[in-house]
Image (cartoon, rainbow, N blue to C red):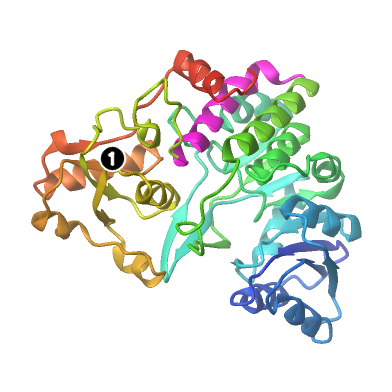
């Protein structure tokens, strides 16, 4: 086992505050036969200097400095320079447990697996949440992949729940399986970059190991999401959709994957709260059918969905944001978000609470917590979920070619 080289690729862009913690967690791996490829994708902060410093600290480190061209380009550059039989991606603002490589590689060799994946930890300003794939842990040969994994890896049966998390980081890949799929990804994709590589790679795999124990720390960040209006999001989602649709067709899995992909796309659209005007008058609120013009709104949820919704409403004159609340408001407040706790609802005058939580199970649990606190159930609005016909209509409204 010690003779096997594992290449760890770290795409980096303006993460100077977190980069050293990331690099140190890789240097400190208990499995020592690794190469560490730091890909500086044109950073404008001190990330470049940090990369250059670590070349002299650990001889296993290689650095690539390149013009900024996005995450996909950075990953391709690192992969082209890699020498390992197995590949692991770690984002530059995240970090990993010391025994990740050793444990993953042990399982890869035990089962002769092409891919090893596990659960992960989301870190929010000191709060840790453990997140698990909905497909059970175990070893899956090709027959099991076809029967038990592929039918639900993008859509588990509940809205915005993946069978396998779409993130490409924190997973160990046999290079010969990963390489063609990563190098093929269209560099015009800027939403869904991970999924565009991960799911085609899983289809090419002959075997997969799913572990339960989490080893990867994903850092939740806010940065400029609320302040910056994102441009051409629908076009970016359309590029991603059409790319994966074409790939699934080429791999002869389109019939199985297309319905899942469409639910996946709808969840991306929902998070961005950009519903088609023909479907509902309040374009910014299409997932929440019962919201009316001039309603006073409380946003419940501080995550990505809540942040997008808050940003939209700041520029939407027909509704007023009365408050923004979350059960874990203390942690979001540390990141600079103006979020209060649920107890604030006792002192507010509002018309609707919109639960900005995309995961169906978490949304339902939050609803019950609000009701237990005495909130009027009739004032709480959850995402309206869609059947296949609704999805077809919505995607066509977005000019996404079905």
> In the visual, does 344 lie left or right of 3?
left
Q: Is residue 247 magenta?
A: no
Q: Which residue is drawn at the image coordinates 36% and 24% (left, top)? A: 280
Classed neighbour count for the residue bearing mark 1: other residues with Cα under 10 Å, few (<14), some (14–19), many (≥20): few
Residue 83 visible at all: no
Residue at 36% from the left image edge and 51% from the top image edge: 314
Q: Quadrant of residue 105?
A: bottom right
Magenta portion: prevailing SS class:
helix
Query: Could you tell me residue 201's position as x and y percent?
Result: 75, 38
Q: Is residue 177 visible?
A: yes
Which quadrant of the structure image shows residue 334?
bottom left
Q: Is residue 382 toward the left or the right of residue 2 in the image? A: left
> What's the magenta region?
252-272
Report the quarter where the N terminus lies. bottom right
Please tell me whether residue 253 is drawn above or below residue 334 in the rendered image. above
Residue 276 drawn at (x, y percent): 45, 26
């Amino acid at each position: 086992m010690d003779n096997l080289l594992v290449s760890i690729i770290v795409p980096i862009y303006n993460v100077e505050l977190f980069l050293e913690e990331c690099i140190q967690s890789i240097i400190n791996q208990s499995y020592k036969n690794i190469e560490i490829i730091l890909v500086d994708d044109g950073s404008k902060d001190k990330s470049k200097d940090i990369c250059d410093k670590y070349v002299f600290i650990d001889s296993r480190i290689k650095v690539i400095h390149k013009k900024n061209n996005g995450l996909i380009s950075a990953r391709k550059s690192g992969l082209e320079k890699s020498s390992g039989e197995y590949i692991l991606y770690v984002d530059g603002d995240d970090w990993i447990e010391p025994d990740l490589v050793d444990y993953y590689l042990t399982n890869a060799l035990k089962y002769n697996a092409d891919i090893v994946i596990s659960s992960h930890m989301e870190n929010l300003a000191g709060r840790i949440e453990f997140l698990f794939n909905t497909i059970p842990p175990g070893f899956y040969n090709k027959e099991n992949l076809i029967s038990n994994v592929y039918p639900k890896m993008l859509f588990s049966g509940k809205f915005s729940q993946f069978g396998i998390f779409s993130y490409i980081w924190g997973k160990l890949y046999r290079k010969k399986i990963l390489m063609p799929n990563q190098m093929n990804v269209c560099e015009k994709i800027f939403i869904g970059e991970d999924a565009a590589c991960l799911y085609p790679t899983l289809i090419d795999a002959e075997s997969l190991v799913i572990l339960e124990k989490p080893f990867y720390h994903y850092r939740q960040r806010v940065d400029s999401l609320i302040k910056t209006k994102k441009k051409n999001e629908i076009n970016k989602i359309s590029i991603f959709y059409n790319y994966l649709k074409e790939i699934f067709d080429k791999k002869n899995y389109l019939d199985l994957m297309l319905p899942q992909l469409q639910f996946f796309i709808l969840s991306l659209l929902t998070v961005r709260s950009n519903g088609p005007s023909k479907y509902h008058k309040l374009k910014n609120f299409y997932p929440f059918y019962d919201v009316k013009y001039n309603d006073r709104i409380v946003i419940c949820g501080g995550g990505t969905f809540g942040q997008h919704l808050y940003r939209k409403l700041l520029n939407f004159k027909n509704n007023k944001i009365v408050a923004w609340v979350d059960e874990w408001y203390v942690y979001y407040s540390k990141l600079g978000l103006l979020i209060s706790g649920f107890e604030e609802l006792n002192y507010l005058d509002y018309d609707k609470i919109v639960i900005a939580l995309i995961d169906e199970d978490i949304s339902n649990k939050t609803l019950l917590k609000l009701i237990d606190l005495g909130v009027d159930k009739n004032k709480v609005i959850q995402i309206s979920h869609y059947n296949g016909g609704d999805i077809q209509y919505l995607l066509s409204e977005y000019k996404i070619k079905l």
